[in-house]
Image (spheres, helix red, strand yellow):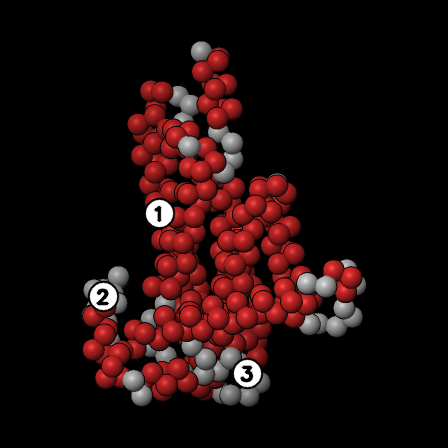
């Protein structure tokens, strides 16, 4: 995707020489093996900026909920607390429908954090002049790899060796084929998560930028509405798949494994 200029670009340009000297630490591009330059720091800086915002909002919402007596009384207008309650409440209910209330509560920290981070990264697309971290494959792939390592860790922690054996399926003579298919589908999950999010957000931002450049008044409004839908849908898809992957990995497998041997 073509590079976009934002306020962060101008800010980093003042440190161009220093960043260029350290660009080799980032490494070459994953897709076309293009060497890193000072602009390669922009998506990383943007992601850190969004992470700080999410952390500050979370701490602010927690402070408002620290008073139990006031926390049980709903507020009559949209505030940080009501936004967090509605936003995280929706994804918590979604997680409960996927993996049940016990596991949803146990694993919601990573699910909720993913939802908040992806949402606020995507929202930047609606603000002219702001950088969007999720248009960079390095950022979306980083998020997807975190999800990948987390759900596999939870899978092994919950089921031990049965998590790996489960990939071979219940029929022994098909086990080699089923295991290869399941292993491939598991390994490709972070790539599909990353590419789907990056492409949708990059194309949405590119279209909005083009129309804003052509006509800055009224005409881009339908595209901005479409952009809001893209932001919400991509946040939902990424978070829902995160919950599904964790739910599948932490589903008790010992019982099914023992039951299969009992029939034989």
Judge left or right: residue 114 versus residue 87: left
Q: Which mark is residue 27?
A: 2
Judge left or right: residue 158 versus residue 33: right
**Nearest to the observer: residue 36 or residue 49:** 49
Q: What element does badge 2 sit on?
A: loop
Q: Position of residue 103 (x, y in %)?
A: 57, 42
Q: Which mark is residue 219?
A: 3
Q: What element does badge 3 sit on?
A: loop
Residue under the image location 49 percent in, 87 percent down: 215
Q: Position of residue 76 (x, y in %)?
A: 78, 70
Residue under the image location 74 percent in, 60 percent down: 68
Is residue 108 shown above or below 38? above
Alpha carbon separation for disc pair 3 and 2 = 41 Å
Q: Is residue 227 visible?
A: no
User: Counting other residues with Cα less than 10 Å from the Cα at mark 3, is it few (<14), some (14-19), or many (20 or more)?
Assistant: few
Q: Earlier in the sequence, mark 1 or mark 3?
A: 1
Please state which of the two labelled residues, at mark 3 or mark 2, is closer to the viewer. Answer: 2
Residue under the image location 41 percent in, 85 percent down: 7
Q: Earlier in the sequence, mark 2 or mark 1?
A: 2
Q: Position of residue 62 (x, y in %)?
A: 63, 64
Judge left or right: residue 237 versus residue 1: right
Please state which of the two labelled residues, at mark 2 or mark 1, is closer to the viewer. Answer: 2
**Nearest to the observer: residue 223 or residue 198:** 198
Q: Earlier in the sequence, mark 3 or mark 2?
A: 2
Residue under the image location 33 percent in, 71 percent down: 1
Alpha carbon separation for disc pair 1 and 3 = 39 Å
- Looking at the image, do the residues carrying marks 2 and 1 touch, with CB atoms under 8 Å apart? no
Alpha carbon separation for disc pair 2 and 1 = 22 Å
Q: What residue sits right under mark 1 in the picture?
A: 188
Is residue 159 shown above or below 13? above
């Amino acid at each position: 995707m073509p590079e976009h200029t934002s306020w962060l670009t101008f800010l980093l340009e003042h440190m161009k020489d220093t960043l260029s000297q350290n660009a080799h630490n980032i490494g070459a591009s994953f897709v076309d093996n293009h060497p890193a330059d000072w602009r390669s720091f922009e998506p990383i800086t943007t992601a850190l900026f969004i992470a700080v915002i999410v952390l500050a909002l979370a701490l602010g919402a927690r402070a408002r909920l620290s008073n139990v007596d006031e926390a049980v009384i709903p507020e009559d207008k949209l505030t940080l607390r009501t936004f967090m309650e509605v936003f995280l409440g929706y994804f918590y209910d979604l997680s409960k429908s996927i993996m049940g209330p016990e596991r949803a509560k146990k694993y919601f920290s990573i699910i909720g954090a993913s939802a908040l981070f992806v949402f606020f990264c995507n929202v930047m697309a609606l603000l002219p002049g702001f950088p969007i971290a999720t248009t960079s494959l390095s950022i979306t792939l980083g998020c997807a790899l975190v999800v990948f390592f987390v759900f596999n860790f939870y899978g092994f922690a919950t089921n031990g060796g049965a998590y790996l054996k489960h990939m071979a399926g219940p029929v022994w003579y098909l086990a080699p084929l089923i295991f290869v298919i399941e292993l491939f589908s598991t390994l490709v999950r972070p790539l599909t998560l990353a590419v789907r999010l990056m492409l949708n957000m990059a194309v949405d931002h590119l279209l909005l930028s083009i129309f804003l450049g052509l006509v800055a008044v009224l005409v881009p409004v339908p595209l901005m509405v479409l952009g809001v839908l893209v932001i919400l849908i991509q946040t939902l898809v990424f978070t829902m798949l995160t919950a599904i992957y964790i739910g599948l990995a932490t589903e008790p497998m010992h019982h099914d494994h023992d039951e299969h041997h009992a029939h034989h």
